[in-house]
Image: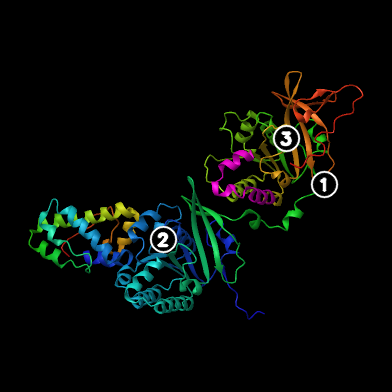
Amino acid sequence: MSTKVTIVRLATGVPGLDVVLGGGLPEFSFNLIAGQPGSGKTTLAHQIMFSLATPERPALYFTALGEPPLKMLRYQQQFDFFDGEAVDRRVRFISLSDDAMAGALDRVLQRIVDEVATHNPAFVFVDSFRAVMHASETNDPSHHAMQQFIQQLGVLMTSWQATTFLIGEYSSESDSSPVFTVADGLIWLRQSVERNSMVRKLEILKMRGQPTLPGLHTFRIGTNGVTIFASASAAAPIEAAAATRPVAQRVSLGVPGLDDMLGGGLPRGYSLLVAGPSGSGKSILAAAFLAEGARVGERGVIAAFEQRPNRTRSQIVVDLIANGNIGLLESHSSDLSIDEITYLLISEIRRLGARRVVIDSLSGFELALAPTFREDFRESLLRMVTAFSVEGVTVLMTSELEDRYTDLRFSPYGSAFLTDAIIVQRYIEVASHLLRVMAVVKVRASVHSSELRAYSIDAGGIRLGEMLADQEGLLGGRPTRRRAGNPASRDGDDTTDG
Amino acid sequence: MWRDIDTALRPVIGQRGVVALYNRSIHLTAATHPWLAPGRQDLATEFNPSTLEALFAQQTEAAALSCGNGLLQAFRQLLASLIGASLTERLLRSAWGPPIDESPTQGCAS
C-alpha cells in the first residue's frame, strides 16, 4: 500500500556499518551506542556525525559529564573524518555539564529542547548519556524519573524529526536500563583481550524494522576511524554464487603435467589445498599458479603470512607484484580476524579485478589471527572460502603438513573437507636419496589422476617426473623395490579422508 | 572581550571549562604580572571578569594594554595547544573577529 510510511535509510559513512545494519540507519530512529570505556563509542558517533551532517541538516553533539569536551575535541580531530571547518557550520558541540552537574533531569531536558529548537538539527548526539543518568540518581534515585526522561527525550527527538544517538558506558547488556526498551537501535561495542591481543567487536542487539546481520563483527580503529568487517558469508550476495561459476571452464596451474593429473586443470572458482612438509615446494607451486595467471592475463592476489618480504619469496612473484599483476596482502600483526583478512582480500580482488588468489600459508595465517579467533578457525575458514567462491576467484591455499608416515593427513586443521581440490606433497626415501612425490587426492565433481608422481624442483620451478612404478610402500616414506610379479601395494588408496 | 569569549566557548566546553582555561591563563601571565593573580576565580561560579576589570583599572594604560594582550595570547595559545589552532580560531571567531594571526586586540580590560 502506498499509504504506508517509507523509512529512509541513511548511509552512515562508516565502512561496513550499513551492511551490518541491514542497509543503513533508519531515519528519525532513537539509538544507543553502548560499550565499555575505550571501546570506540565516541569515535563511532563522531564518524557518523561528520558523515551525515550537512549545513541544511546539521548535527548537535551534546557532551555531558563524561569526557571533557576539550579532551574530546583534542583527540577526535586526529581522525581523518574530523572536519574542523564543519564545526559551528554543520556540526555544533554543546556542553550540558553545567546542567548535568546540578543533577536535575528536567533542566537537562529543557536545555536539550531549547538547543534543538534553536538549531533545528537533523541529528542529535548525547555523550555520555550514562553520566546524565548517574548525576540524576543522586538527586532523584527513582527509576521512574529516569524512565520518564528517556521517554520524553525519545518522543521529543522523533517529533523534531531528528535521528538521535545516545552514547553510554554499559559493561553488559544484563545491566538493565529503561533506555534499552525505549531505543529503536542498540549498537554494542566490545573489546576482548586474550593474551597480548585485543580485538574489537560490534554487535547490533536491536534495530527496529531492519534485517541486521546477527553476531559479533570485528572492527578496527585507524586514522580514518572505524572500519567494520562484516562476517564474510553474510556480507556476500549468495545468489551470485551459482551464476559466477561456469562449470566447464578450467584454469591451468602452470606446472607441466599437473593439469592433466587434475583432469584438465583446476575448475574455475575452485579452492585448492596444497599440503606438504616444509620445503616440499608449496610456495613454488603457488608462484607458478600466479605466474600462469599473469601469462594469460588474469591478475592475482597473494596473502603472505609466512615469509619475509622479498627475502625468500620467489623472484617471479616479486616481479609480478612490482608490475602490478599481483596484489600483495601482508600482515605481521597477531590480532587479525578472518573477517578482516577476508575483507581486505576481497577489496584487493575487486580493485584489481583479480581471478586468482593464493594464501601462503594457512599455518602462518592461523598464527596471524588473534588467539580468540583460533578456536573457530575452521568455521571462519569456511566462511572465507565461501566468500571467495562468490567472488568467482580460483583459490590456492598452502598448508604445512608434518610428515608422518603412519597416517595420511592433509592439514593440521582438518580443513581438507573445506576445499574443492587437494594436492598432497611428501618426501620419500629411495636409495639413500630424499625424493619428492605428489598426488592429486581430490577434485570435487571431476575425474582426476590417482598417480603418485615423483617431481623435482630446479630454477625453472616444479618438474613432474614419472611414477615410481618399481617401488612400493611410498606413502610409508620408505618404499621398497617391488619384486617382479608382486602386485602394486594398495596402501593409502583408501585412506584419503584426512 | 572576555565576555565574548565566554559567550563563544561556554556552550561548547561548559562554564567550568571556560573558567579553568581562564584561571590557567591568569596563572601563566601572573608570572610576569603578579598583580593579576587575584583575578582567578572559583571553578564552580559563573565566569565574571569584573574582578579582572577592577585590577586592570588600577594599572597605567600602557601596562594594562600589554598585560591584557599577554593574557589573551596566553588563553589563545592554551586553547590552541589543546584543540589545535584552526578549531580554536573557529570557536572563537565570534569573539575575536579577525583570524588568529592578525592583531587580535584593541583593549583588554573589557
* Amino acid type of the residue that numbered disc 3 sits on in the rendered structure: Glu
Q: Chain of mark 2?
A: A
- The image's mark for residue A86 is 2
Q: Is residue A226 left or right of residue A315?
A: left
Q: Which mark is residue A257?
A: none
**SS label for mark 3:** helix
How far across and down, in percent of the image, does residue A322 sit?
A: 60, 34
Q: Dot 2, crowdedness within 10 Å: few (<14), some or many (≥20)?
A: some
Marked residue chain, label 3:
A
The reply to whether callout 3 and callout 2 are in contact (CB within 8 Å) is no
| Residues shaded magenta | A361-386
**Residue B23 at x, y = what percent?**
20, 59
Q: Does residue A61 appear in the picture of this structure?
A: no
- The Cα atoms of the two marked residues, 2 and 1, are separated by 58 Å
Mark sitting on residue A292: 3
Specify few, some or many for label 3: CA neighbours under 10 Å numbering under 14, 14-19, or 20 or more.
some
Structural crowding at the residue carrying mark 1, measured as other residues with C-alpha within 10 Å and reported as few (<14), some (14–19) or many (≥20): few
Q: Is residue A54 above or below residue A266?
A: below
Q: Earlier in the sequence, mark 3 or mark 1?
A: 3
Name the one closer to the observer, A37 or B89: A37
Q: Position of residue A439 (x, y in %)?
A: 78, 34
Please tell me whether mark 3 or mark 2 is closer to you in this view. 3
